[in-house]
Amino acid sequence: MYAERIFNSRNRPGLPEDLFALPECTCLVSGGCHDWCDLLAGELASRGDRIAFFIELPLTDEQTGESIVPVFWQDNYVPLLPNETRTLTCSFTSTEQPLVFAVRGWNVAAVSRNLMTA
């Protein structure tokens, strides 16, 4: 889980223990490129009765797995309430390479979707 990658110890000062007790949840992701793929609109949807916490949306090169930088999201590390849907947009320098749009978070099962950029 993403939380374990960030924090390898559950005894970090200042973190409420309840964060570690959040049950895993699933988010759906859809999205597409606009304006020659300089702008991406991504829709996140939380399914079920659990909050999805600390969600990030990285863009990576499909072939190399390298992060696409810089990416300027309208918001970062967002929460989703149960059954909430939210659309976020970002801008980035267009690339000829196929991209992968991913969703991961504190208690969110990682999901990814391929994007066509050409």
Image: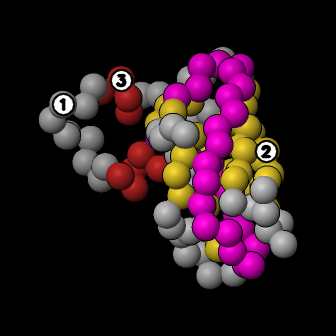
> Of the residues tagged 2 and 3, which is closer to the observer?
2
- Residue 108, x across and y down, in percent: 57, 40
Tell me the magenta residue range. Answer: 79-106
> Which one is nearer the viewer's eye here, 93 or 12?
93
Name the residue tied to disc 2.
Answer: 30
Amino acid type of the residue tagged 2 in the rendering: Ser
Residue 94's image quarter? Answer: bottom right
Residue occupying image coordinates x 38% and y 29%: 19
Q: Earlier in the sequence, mark 2 or mark 3?
A: 3
Q: Kindly give the residue lying farthest to the left in the view shown.
A: 13
Amino acid type of the residue tagged 3 in the rendering: Asp
Residue occupying image coordinates x 62% and y 81%: 64
> Of the residues tagged 1 and 2, which is closer to the observer?
2
Residue 18 is marked as 3
Amino acid type of the residue tagged 1 in the rendering: Gly
Q: Secondary structure at mark 2?
A: strand
> Of the residues tagged 3 and 1, which is closer to the observer?
1
Name the residue tied to disc 1.
Answer: 14
